[in-house]
Amino acid sequence: MHSLPTQAIMRPLSLSPTLSLSSSASGSSRYLCFLSLPIFHKPKSSYNFLFNVSHKVPPRFTVRSCSSISAKPSSELRKKRSGSDSDEKLRALRELFSRPGIGIDAYIIPSQDAHQSEFIAECYMRRAYISGFTGSAGTAVVTKDKAALWTDGRYFLQAEKQLSSSWILMRAGNFGVPTASEWLNDFLPPGGRVGIDPFLFSSDGAEELKQDIAKKNHELVFIHDLNLVDEIWKESRPKPPNKPVRVHDIKYAGLDVASKLSSLRSELRDAGSSAIVISMLDEVAWLLNLRGSDVPHSPVIYAYLIVELDKAELFIDNSKVTTEVRAHLESAGIELKPYDSILREVESLASQGAQLWLDTSSVNAAIVNAYNTACERYYKSLENKSKSKTDDGINGWSSLPKGVYKVSPLSLAKAIKNAEELEGMRNSHLRDAAALAQFWDWLEEEIHKDVKLTEVEVADKLLEFRSKQAGFLDTSFDTISGSGANGAIIHYKPEPDSCSIVHANKLFLLDSGAQYVDGTTDITRTVHFGEPTRREKECFTRVLQGHISLDRAVFPENTPGFVLDAFARSFLWKIGLDYRHGTGHGVGAALNVHEGPQSISYRYGNMTPLQEGMIVSNEPGYYEDHAFGIRIENLLHVKEVDTRNRFGGIGYLGFEKLTFVPIQAKLVDLSLLSVEEVTWLNDYHSQVWEKVSPLLDGSARQWLWNNTRPLVKN
């Protein structure tokens, strides 16, 4: 899947000019060891500041939820909204602005759920419901007379198609396009009130927004009792998922829950913290060795987790907890609590003097504000006691509640895979490669027989092949199946009533992935079933050169991913071309297909160094709007490289390929490739044949043979 155009992956949406996901610097080769395993890796630096948000809101919040059915994939929502439908929704939303107790001039609807997830359950797709735009990244802002939507370059064409005339498309990152806060400052009269649902914004995101709009004396209003979009969605709003949770087998996890908790508690002690709130769904799943199906494409569950020095509590819908899962959690000392009791527990911790670790880049503003408000109450009660007993103030008290504001230690720990996780990723990628070989063999045959297939039919057939592989669970994202001009829509999702035929004489881009019980895959191939033009071959070959350059890179440890981004772009730059997305994103082991904190991107805000054990994608591309799209993607494992020298006494790193599917030779202009690049391609295809052919027979095996023959440069 194309890489996010961001500094870090899976951090909450920021209202910066590029709609970046907020990030924090983290990562080094120093670890905290337990049982001789590097489980929690200490960052060289992390922010640690007192973050107080003071809003005129009641001290208590209510966590809302809808009642219960399984979530549908986002693809089932992707239908173009009519202008009248959009107008009616906006009218109904604006009527709520003047309701007693609300009184706002604008309302912001982000993409996220309460856990800052990239993929979310259908009942939380509020921005898609109100705007009609179904891309995974974007922010909608509605005032009393205007409605605008910000999204990044991956979605410009999609948003043009899906937004009605009632909406203004703001192409974030383009020159002259204001941020959402700048736009509000321009269009709202000074002293306006801007409403948000504090559960849907990270604490950092809410504070950033508050400061930005304060420049024009606007006030940020937390509307905590209800979400305004939910109010107009009403009975038609889908219900939340309720499928059972499952245990992730130790043979795939590699480390038991008790060991992970022990390491986390050591981190808490070192940080001077007595408890931590974990709200990122993949972090909860990884720490507890649990998996689920609450969110399309991601094997996670809707839950919060609080880990204290002597106990831990999982906040979850109890109906999803099976007998096996309950026993698994009890053996690790995990207590179950209702999902919607998280704020009460946070307030209780403050009243007990807990020093609570909060990653304000991911924990939502409602939780952080609840803790801060409870701390203020605690301090006042101590002051009152002090006045009645002594004039010594509060200096005599040894335990005072205080926030410890640092990046979650689980983010880096999860990103650095252990031996069992890596083995599962290798094995799942080989099975996935076998399914893809069967698929490409079938598709080429159908196209050559002049069978008319739609982009949707092709994607469905790929799902059919994958579903026959052992351990298959789901796709890891909506398949991007784009023929011709549709391939230029970076995040294209074909729909049955509007998709194109897969043309024999046009480039076809297929970006797909799968969730297996032991691993997560993500691969893109671009092919041509006829004769490609000279322009198409040149563009494809330059993308391939960038892909090869990054794959072959050797770099010193502690190198941030952004340093490597130019390796993939330089061959396009030489002829004045580029692409509007990052080059690589982290990938989870049987978890989210987009994972942080590492990334390879042209944006240099993410200082997280690539470390041994991380997995990243390598996916340069090139897109000509309304013509074609090209992308070549493999997943890579960061590994240690044995170099002849070790300048400065440090180690050097490189990559191990995980993806083994042929790259179409007919699209390669050999005259542009160096001898070394041709050798790389031939060596890669030799490995593809060696690793994948034992899993195939019949015509699929012959297809693999035909497409892995060595190329000769004249």
Image (tube, grey):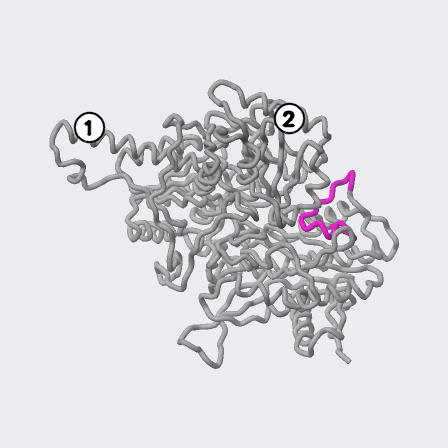
Most extreme residue toward the top is: 100
Q: Secondary structure at mark 2?
A: helix
- Could you tell me if residue 242 is visible in this image? yes
Placement of 568 over or under 10, stated as above or below: below
- Which residue in the structure is indicated by mark 2? 89
Quadrant position of the C terminus in the picture: bottom right
Percent across and percent down for residue 170 are 63, 42
Considering only vertical position in the picture, is 269 above or below 379?
below
Residue range (magenta): 482-498
Q: Residue furthest left?
A: 390
Which one is nearer the viewer's eye here, 383 or 66?
383
The part of the image, by quadrant, that contains residue 360 is top left
Looking at this view, name the residue that lies furthest to the right. Answer: 450
How far from the left and from the top, in percent, is residue 624?
74, 55
Q: Quadrant of residue 438?
A: bottom right
Residue at 69% x, 73% y is: 682
Q: Is residue 517 magenta?
A: no
Q: Is residue 495 magenta?
A: yes
Taking 499 as reference, is 467 left or right? left
Q: Residue at x 73, y 62 (%)?
A: 697
Q: Secondary structure at mark 1?
A: helix
The location of residue 523, given as percent across then percent down, is 65, 57
Alpha-carbon neighbours of circle 2 within 10 Å: few (<14), some, or many (≥20)?
some
Q: Is residue 693 visible?
A: no
Of the numbered discs 2 and 1, the one sitting upstream in the chain is: 2
Q: Are marks 2 and 1 in contact (CB under 8 Å)?
A: no
> Crowding near pointer 1: few (<14 within 10 Å), some, many (20+)?
few
Would residue 576 appear left or right of 111 to someone viewing this image? right
Residue under the image location 36 percent in, 44 percent down: 276
> Compared to 412, does 105 lie above or below?
above
Amino acid bearing label 2:
Lys
Q: Which residue is mark 1?
A: 384
